[in-house]
Amino acid sequence: MNFSGLAKRSGLLPFAAAAVLLFLKALLFRYFLFDHIAWAQVPADLASILVLVGLFDTISPDKSKKYVLWAVNFVVSLLLFASTLYFNYFSTIPTYSALNELHQVGGVKDSVKATIHWQNFLFFADVLVMAIAWLIGRIRGTGVEAGRTSRTWKLGVIALTVLGLFGSYLYIHNSRSIENELAQAEDVGFLNYQVSAALKAQEAAAKVKNIDVGKLTEQVGQLASSNPDLQTTETAPEGFGAMKGKNVIVIQMEAFQNFPIRLQLDGQEITPVLNGLADQSYYFPHFFQQIGQGNTSDAEFMSNTSIYPTAKVAMSTGYGDRAIPSLPKLLEKRGYAAETFHVNDVTFWDRNKLYPALGFDKYFDKPYFNDDHFNAFGASDEELYKTAVNRMVELKNENKPFYIQMITASSHHPFKIPKDKQWLKLPADMEGTQLGDYLQAVHYTDYAIGELIKALKANGLYDNTMLVIYGDHFGLQPQDNKPEDVSRKLDITYQERISRFNIPLIVHAPGAAPKVIKTAGGQVDIMPTVANLLGVSLKDENYTAFGHDLLNTVKNVFGMRYYLPTGSFFNNEVMFVPGKSFDDGTAISLDTLQPVADISKYRADYDYVMKLMGLSDTFVESLPKR
């Protein structure tokens, strides 16, 4: 009996083809993400594929079986393709929850296109081959008819499915202690990782039942006092109330890293405005992004709340229906107007839910700005600031102090700005590169801030206003910018993670003595720092903050996840990234940007950050619906 005859009569061919093709694609996915294939973990992929293909093979009628399995193959191929692009852009593996944000892709289509490489389409090579084979078969009038599945084969498929289910269970169970998402995904494979993520989400949801928020707040305070590496000043808070009653302008700069600050290129200052502002302000050179799945919107969430993003869902999407404690709400109690400005549509990343949840009185989005077609988002930073200043003047005339948040977009990936706004003279080896485009974009962003400052001064607002300026997240994409190339071209030391996640924070407080503060900080620290300067005591307000006032923190410790594995943290000395656990993690010095051999002294910080982020997750989950 020949094989083709057996395949036709038993129904073996559709199952075998689907299983083999998906297995090969799982190997390809591993190679794309990890630059190698960990063969010891490959059986995890095989187990999950046997479960998936076996289930659909079992429930599908014989006549439609091959079509169902080809549909499964296509859907999984699409998921692997999309997940590869997602990893290229975000450096993390998406879970099923990221599918909720697929409708946001249209808003950043230029960025998505820029991440696609031709190799990624290998996931669909078999689809093309089968389409050609089907077309030839139609022309010739031939084709493979579906065979009737034998009872023996059906039992065999069920047995393989059960075997795969048992294998998947073992892999998922044995990896439960791995907090590092990338390490876990490599251990259990893409499909099993989705199941593991769902199980963890269920466990997290169960923990928030019957939570006593008061006790949770006490735990946060006790946790901070138990960490020897977290040190605050023992004297009266520095700067407390120095800006009391003054207006506040918060500028969140799109994709703005710290390395352009004070950088020169062939004698040209990249950020002359911010350089001058940093010299007259509190400047924090060791400041880092902490965003999760919501990216820019997560940065807005953190800077206004001092709560960690869960990294499981964009905070605007997952918690926009909650009563969220925030700085805008605290200031509104003190008579402030709280308003926010963004040139994109307010529904992008569900900001129409986020802004009311944060307590903003009003938001200004796309229709409020003159569209000068600067980039894919529409209006330029200059138009953003013109509209905002007009509104500030109105509030000034009403004798109303204000808290104004502005989200810039002119330096958004892929950093293509109009030719007449490209004022830097780039070296030949930077022309047409992402690095060159990025420098042009941030140079324009800096210029526009200068125009804003001129307008504030012209309208008598500058001397009575505190400016808070920071980056939301990194700009340079790692797959397009090798650290050694950036270092060589700019004559700096560009570390692949520390330099990438390092963003600027500048707080211009009129009348305050300028100071460079080298305490390490993250975006959860913005709100406590600003509240201190405004004379808002978070302790008196019984406010649960998960960050710290950087003006009064001598040594800081804070966590980061999503773009780094859970358990990663920064302190004043290092950036630490765990492996499967703390023991196989790595630490890089913030000062030398070199590896640190002895990591044992950082275990307490690791334990602290894991507990702190867990408490933050529990806290935000426990917030009541609005």
Image: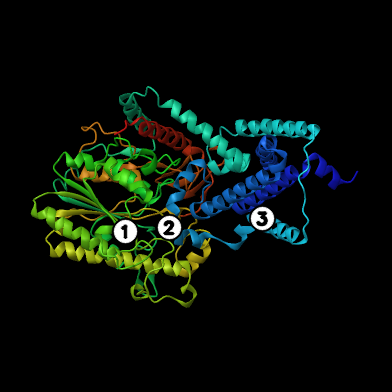
In this view, the residue farthest toward the top is 210
**Which of the two discs, 3 and 1, labels the residue nearer the N terminus?**
3
Circle 2 SS class: helix
Q: What residue is rendered at 26% in x and 34% in y?
A: 543
Q: Is residue 17 left or right of residue 595?
A: right
Label 3 to label 2, Cα distance in Å? 28 Å
SS assignment at label 1? loop
Query: What kind of residue is marked 3?
Result: Val
Earlier along the polypeptide chain: callout 2 or callout 1?
2
Foreground mark, 3 or 1, reads: 3
Please give the name of the residue rendered at 51% of the width and 32% of the height, measured from the top-left corner: 200
Examine the rendering and report whether any part of residue 511 can be seen.
Answer: no
**Mark 1, residues whose alpha carbon is within 10 Å: few (<14), some, or many (≥20)?**
many
- Indicate the amino acid at tag 1: Thr
Q: Which mark is residue 235?
A: none
According to the image, label 3 marks what residue? 127
Do the numbered discs 2 and 1 sit on residues whose CB atoms are within 8 Å? no
Residue 408: which numbered mark, if any? 1
Q: Nearer the viewer, residue 140 or 465?
A: 140
Identify the residue under disc 2: 108
Numbered label tally: 3
- Rounded to the nearest whole Å, what is the CA distance between mark 3 and mark 1? 42 Å
Q: Earlier in the sequence, mark 3 or mark 2?
A: 2
Residue at image position (61%, 54%) is: 32
State which mark lies toward you, 2 or 1.
2
Q: Is residue 57 left or right of residue 347?
A: right
Which color scheme does this rendered protein use?
rainbow
Image quadrant holding the N terminus, namely top right
